Every structure is written in structure tokens, then in C-alpha cells.
Image (cartoon, rainbow, N blue to C red):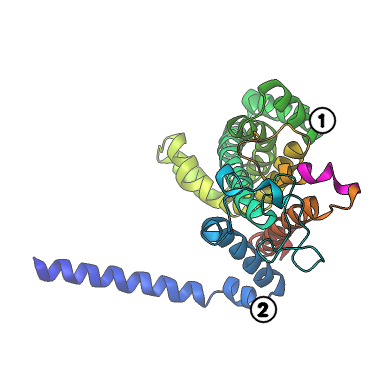
Amino acid sequence: MQVQVKTSNALKGSAENSKLKTFLSSEFIYNYKRSPTAIIGSIITIVVLLTALIGPFFTVQNPYDMSTIDLSDAYKPPAWIEGGDSNFILGTDQQGRDILSAIVYGSRISLIIGVAGTLFASIIGITLGLVSGYFGGRVDALIMRMADIQLSFPTMLIALFLMTFFGRGIGNILIALCLVGWVRYARTVRGETLTVKKKEYIEATRVIGLPNFKIISKHVLPNVFTSIIVLSTIQVGSFILTEATLSFLGLGVPVTRPSLGMLCNNGFKVLYSGLWWVSIFPGLYIMLIVFGINLLGDFLRDELNPKLK
């Protein structure tokens, strides 16, 4: 019995190693290694994620713990400018908070909102897109008309209206992002589903009597998943920008849990007073995050979308 178990484990391990070798020698990895866009995007994304995860362990202060803040340090310029302090490399804000520390802590909130918002919006959009494309008829017409109505309004206008209605808060901003972000998933997945459901193997599954749920989950969804991955990558960057804009306008996260957008808002009030570093550095970091994610998303779009090959 033990010999059989060991043999089974050995076979599984051999199969996994074979799959790994096949993946590493695939065209996708070959093109990835030779794509500066993909490599630079990956490096930026990894650095941003590591900064958000372990950065707080290396910052000079917790910018949201009042016991670590000294008001006498307010508006110190970056360390390389006359009057700067080497402890505050990127300077400080009106409360004496270290800008670099605030960026590290604020990026956590922005990334969480971007990733979580994309996840929830994708679940809603994928579900509606699969139902719409597979069943068609009145269900399809209803879902697509809802999507058309929403697409007739600017995304930011809808987000502003929803945040005004719901009020500030991380939970509320996630709801708003879900309500404005599901449409792209629904339309993309519906289009892919309409193509996939005409395939012969889908017809065969219907003939043998498989229920619709199993057909959709096991045969339709896996075939539209590449488009979902590409769209999700780009959507994360879009949601981070949307959240930053809402927070900049004072309709995003609460003051007690500030994000990068709120840091830009705080600095904008004194931008024309010569205290440029308070808002410029958080704004540049937002740009860096979105730039890295979009570079990676562009590569995935080119590689995973067969229509572009």
C-alpha cells in the first residue's frame, strides 16, 4: 500500500515538473524574456507591492500615529534642498508627517482599493456577461440595455454621484467602483461567450445532458479567462486613478485612513506657496504605479489576445 502511495506521489510530482518545464519553455515566457515592456512593468509592480507590504517596517515614523509626529517639523523641504532634514528624505507636510512614510502607508490603501474593487467588479461583470451571452433573449437584452445606459454617462460622473449618495468610506468607494466597473467585464465576457457557445464541443455537452451551470463553469468560463486576466490588469490601474481622483476631491477614503489621492489634496492647498513636495511626490508615485501596471497589462493583452497575433 505504501509503495502504491509513493508511486502515486512520484507520478504527480513528475507531472507537475513536466507542466512547469512546458510552461517555462512556452512561447509566452520566450516573448516575456525579450519584452522590455513586460520586464519593466513587472519590476515596477513588484517594487510597488513590496513597498506597500514591508515598507512600513523601514519608515522613520508612522505618519498616522500622532505620538510620532512633531509639529515643529512641519513643511521641511526634501533632504537635498537647503533647510531639509536627512531624516525626512522627501520633506514633510503641514503636520510634520514624513512624506515618504505617508506615501508608503497611503499606497497600501490605494492598492487594496484597486485590487479589491477589480475583484468584486469582475465577479459581478463576469457573472452577468456569462448569463447574457449564454442564454440570450430577454435576459441578454435587459443586461445589455443596462450596460448601454451606464456607458452613456462618464464613469467619473457616476462615481462622484454614488460617493455623494453613499458618503465617504472604503466600503462605499468599493461599492461605487463595482457599480461603475462591471460593464466592461460584462460586455467583454458576453462577446467571448457568444463565440464560444457556438463551438461543436459546447453543442456536444448539451446533447449529453449536462446542466447549464456545469457547461458555463467548466467549458465556457475557462475559454474566456484570458480576456478577463488582461482586462483585470488594466482595470486595477484605472481603479487606483479613480480612487485617487475621488479622494483628491474629498469624496474618497476618510481622513483617518488617507490614500495617495488625499495626500495630493493636502499638498494642493499649498502648492502655489512654494511647498511643491507635499503633493508632487504622492502624485508621481500614483503615476509610477499606474505606469507599471499598464505596461504589464499591454504585454498581457498582446500575448493573450489571439486577435492581435
Instruction: Say whether marks 1 and 2 touch (CB < 8 Å).
Output: no
Q: Amino acid at mark 1?
A: Phe
Farthest residue to the left: give it. 1
Q: Amino acid at mark 2?
A: Arg
Name the one closer to the observer, 154 or 304: 154
Q: Which residues are magenta?
A: 265-272
Q: Is residue 269 magenta?
A: yes
Q: Residues within 10 Å of mark 2 (few under 14, many from 20)?
A: few
Q: Quadrant of the N terminus?
A: bottom left
Q: Quadrant of the C terminus?
A: bottom right
Give the image quarter of residue 246.
top right
Q: Locate residue 209, reporting x and y percent.
A: 40, 37
Residue hosting label 1: 153
Name the one closer to the observer, 99 or 217: 99
Q: Residues within 10 Å of mark 1 (few under 14, many from 20)?
A: few
Which residue shows up at 82% across the image and 66% down it? 82
Relative to 12, say whether 134 is above or below.
above
Residue 109 appears in view: yes
The chief SS type of the magenta part is helix
